[in-house]
Image (cartoon, rainbow, N blue to C red):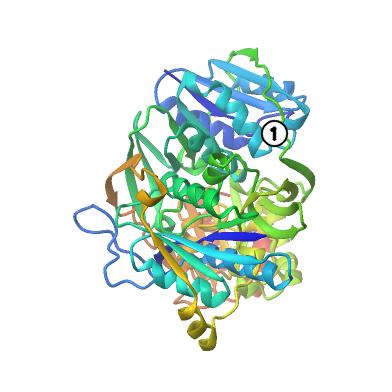
Amino acid sequence: MASLVIAEHDNATVKGATLNTVTAALKCGGDVHVLIAGSNAGGAAAAAAQIAGVAKVLHADAAYFEHGLAENIAAQVLAIAKDYSHLLFPATAAGKNVAPRVAAKLDVGQISDITKVDAADTFERPIYAGNAIATVQSLDAIKVITVRTTGFDPAATTGGSASIDTLASVADSGKSVFVGSEIAKNDRPELTAAKIIVSGGRAMGSSEKFNEVLTPLADKLGAALGASRAAVDAGYAPNDWQVGQTGKIVAPQLYIAAGISGAIQHLAGMKDSKVIVAINKDEEAPIFSVADYGLVADLFVAVPELVKALG
Amino acid sequence: MKVLVPVKRVVDYNVKVRVKSDGTGVDIANVKMSMNPFDEIAIEEAVRLKEKGLVTEVIAVSCGVTQCQETLRTAMAIGADRAILVETSDELQPLAVAKLLKALLDKEQPGLVILGKQAIDDDCNQTGQMLAALADLPQATFASKVELTADAVSVTREVDGGAETLKLTLPAIITTDLRLNEPRYVTLPNIMKAKKKPMEVLKPSDLGVDVKAHLKVLKVSEPPKRSAGIKVPDVATLVSKLKNDAKVI
């Protein structure tokens, strides 16, 4: 039986998390199909067809798919779910929103946030903020899965030549309406896809200081900006910058933690980074227990110095 | 309008759990248990809606062992009017909990159900969405703002890159994110008052729900340990290490 990846996309192109999900799907065995449910999403469907390893793209187009409302997307997935052994969603805000709706309607359990595929029915997933890893076996015929993107390498965006089939769109549920959104626009890489992340904690002291000190470093490194929960709660950084158990899970090549003490919840979100740098004036801070390179220093001195040293 | 708020008893968020040496789970004997933090936010939101006069009754629900009564008392100390415990010592997975809640939904007919977005023990993030699907109701997950009127609710949700606002018909299902509100401290007089509030105890069989497991835990293990690296004396050494040893810049 084949696996279906429910793509995350912006109608024009597929988002990075889709690529990691394709890799997880390939490990489940069988062909991998990708569903693009969107509005004028021909661009995204064409991009999905290029992804290495994808055998078929299913494209459902309707105006009410534009904003990815859970009720409508879940209904579209359910219309074709019976043809698949595995339904895989990226464990992003969008994927987490829709997947359980699909699982409940199919009367199957969901396996959330998998980091490894051991067998077609057996998966590993972190629990307790990553302090334990559970190996779980699904007892259901259809496996509904969300994929932690940091657990799988992204599939190549080229090399595939999948066919694109057009699906009949399901009807609009009419029970929820998209009113508007405030999506921050900036040129930085997306937090979950960034190769380098510069992250600030409570020690930043204010949102002005946060920007003044960390932005030049992020600019210099072409990095995304992140924050600890303490910094977000204090209003120093926007909500969607939060790295941790209940925020974003990241695993960049380089994670620079400035003024972050290293609470369990924060470590859960970044400890799979390849290289971790911690800058903190408290040498007892728990962040140093996971850092490859620790610098005990006042970040307000060390970070500008670092910017200068990077030339 | 009634509001139903499911709450879960979990290991307190300050406790660092240990994996049992036989790999069957984590050791929660003699560990402090508390209400799941996201559920506390859910109760707080429901109580605030009642204080604004938009809601007539807040009902707290928990599914699990007898000790969940403590969690429900806490919910009533925050301001829930009454509580329902669906008591079982069976392990409950999210789909089973969603089915139990669906049965209570049919019984109580609330206008709104507010749940935490995820429990901090199994980190599943499923129950609210599953309940919405089983009840065929609209959902707004990861809420950072809730505005309720007589026949609809506007919810601002935290999404990747920012926030979006949805308008749902009622009844509706909402799950809470961290920044929706800051739960109040529970005061002693309110704890005393909560002891006198009514608590109904049911069994899953009373609701006609089969709570069988859909996932089998084969083993629970320690995550790979990340060992501490080195301390560098200054910024110049740090830059040289990152360039020459780690080769990440």
Q: Chain of mark 1?
A: A
Please provide percent x and percent y for residue A129: 44, 58
Residue B200 sits in quarter: bottom left
Q: Decide: few, some or many residues near mark 1? Use Cα within 10 Å; few <14, some 14-19, many ≥20.
A: some
Q: Residue at x 24, y 59 (%)?
A: B20
In this image, A1 relative to A240: left or right?
left
Residue B30 sits in quarter: bottom left
Q: Residue at x 42, y 69 (%)?
A: B12
How many tags in the picture? 1
In this image, A29 relative to A206: left or right?
left
Residue extending farthest left: B22
The answer to whether residue B74 of the structure is visible from this angle is yes
Vertical order, B177 against A41 (above or below): below
Q: Between residue A244 and residue B96, name the one nearer to us.
A: B96
The answer to whether residue A231 of the structure is visible from this angle is no
In this image, B212 relative to A277: left or right?
left
| Quadrant placement of the N terminus of chain B | bottom right
Vertical order, A298 against A1 (above or below): below
The residue under label 1 is: A173
Q: Between residue A102 and residue A206, name the one nearer to us.
A: A102
Please provide percent x and percent y for residue A259: 58, 71
Badge 1 amino acid: Ser
Q: Circle 1 — which element?
A: loop
Vertical order, B22 against A304 (above or below): above
Q: Between residue A291 and residue A306, name the one nearer to us.
A: A291
Vertical order, A138 against A311 (above or below): above
Please provide percent x and percent y for residue A189: 68, 45
Q: Residue at x 65, y 61 (%)?
A: A309
Please provide percent x and percent y for residue A254: 54, 52
